[in-house]
Amino acid sequence: MFRKVADAFKIKEIRHRIWFVFLCLVIIRVGSAIPVPGIDSSVFKSWFENLASQSGGAFNFIDAFTGGSFSTMSILALSITPYITASIIIQLLTIAIPALEEMQKDGEEGRKKLTAITRYTTIGLSIFESVAMCIGFTNQGLITDMNFAKGVMIVVALTAGSSFLMWLGEQITEKGIGNGISMVLLINILSRLPNDLASLYELFIKGKKIAPALLAAVIIIAVILAMIVLVLLLNGATRNIPVQHSKKMAGRRMVGGQSSRIPLKVNTAGVIPVIFASSIMSFPGIIATLTNHSNDGGVLGTILGILNSNNWFNFSKPIYNIGLIIYIALCIFFAYFYTSITFNPLEVADNLKKQGGFIPGFRPGRPTSDYLTEVLKYVVFIGAVGLVIIAVIPFFFNGVFGADVSFGGTSIIIIVGVILETVKQIESMMDVRNYKGFLNA
């Protein structure tokens, strides 16, 4: 992989694209250090550090996706999450709203309209989240001397930061390499890794004798490498469905008869199920914290304890492990739900029929669709189980050994996936250049 990247730097066009991405990522990290006007970042940082043990995964999940911008309340505190949420909402609405579905099928013009709608939705979500944060943090006493003008300034700063990241992500996609939104997530997650590794060092290695410290270091490295290998296997695994194309007359010649395949990815939904499940589990804890109900006892305290990932694998209070079961169920549910949106077996079967293709042993049309649906059930389940294993491993070490870090299975899936896709795009760009050189020769 490193050799391919080194070869890419020898090509002027690709080299310029890579440097453009690097410059954009530097700008993102600089922006993450600029505080929102009227807010004391040190107050927020201290509050989040004290809150970490109570709200655990709720704020750690957000802070990992924002590269630490949320805990310091910088102008990029909302990060790219409103855009991701807006994209998912629009994608879901294309099923329920026929007009949006028509836009999706209407080629380039339709996609431009959907992109514009997604942008407006992103700005709307950014304003909503900014106002909610402004009210919640004022009630917490973290924002002092609040008035209308100051509130507007904070909301505008946070909304502008999120909109700027959305625009920058689109520029990376157009003028750089890789998917811009994914690259923004990648740099935010990677920026948290040094702090997380330092925390692991402080907890398991520092101050211990050589043998236990060395053993702890080996175990930490082995666990991280094992998770990376699992992600690689999960991303690369496919179930290939054989397809045969019937022969037909074209003039005086018989054409067709070739065989091909339909590759069904095992991890068809990517990291979306884990993000959905984590967001749903985190949402009540965040609301309770912002409304000063996080320390309430009784039923509410028990529910918040169940939803807090820091309490999972806590054998002294087994009732909290109900949250782990809910989390696993949500991951599996969203894996099936999202796959049902992005992959339509009936549409695939109809396209095969139009192209004169068929799956051996199954008639074109409905029988082919039913077969694909049946295969998809097993494939999605295997992928969902793989996702759950990767996502739950960090929770296990957190609950049993107290290894509280912001990165987890979700972060590793994103890091590995984005790097692989970026390298593939570099390879394809190099291949296109070689083809051009061959044609011009």
Image (cartoon, grey):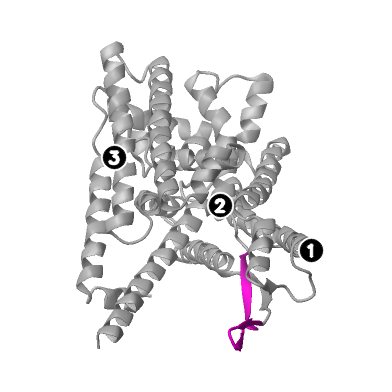
Where is mark 3, residue-wise? 164
Mark 2 to mark 1 CA distance (whole Å): 42 Å
| First along the sequence among labels 3 and 1 | 3
Which quarter of the figure has residue 176? Answer: bottom left
Q: Residues within 10 Å of mark 3 (few under 14, many from 20)?
A: some
Where is mark 1, residue-wise? 367
- Is 49 placed left or right of 408 in the picture? left
- Residue type, mark 2 in image: Pro
**Is residue 60 at least partly visible in the picture?**
no
Residue 292 to residue 394: above or below:
above
Q: Nearer the viewer, residue 87 or 318?
A: 87
| First along the sequence among labels 2 and 1 | 1
Q: Nearer the viewer, residue 198 or 57?
A: 57
Q: Residues within 10 Å of mark 1 (few under 14, many from 20)?
A: some
Q: Main secondary structure of the magenta part?
A: strand
Residue 333 to residue 440: above or below:
above
Residue at the far front in the pictured view: 251
Q: Magenta residues?
A: 248-265
Where is mark 2, residue-wise? 394
- Is 433 placed left or right of 244 in the picture? left
Q: Residue at x 68, y 58 (%)?
A: 345
Indicate yes or no whether the magenta region holds residue 255.
yes
- Residue type, mark 3 in image: Phe
Residue 49 position within the rendered picture, expressed as x and y whole percent measured from the top left: 41, 34
Question: Helix, strand, or loop for circle 3?
Answer: helix
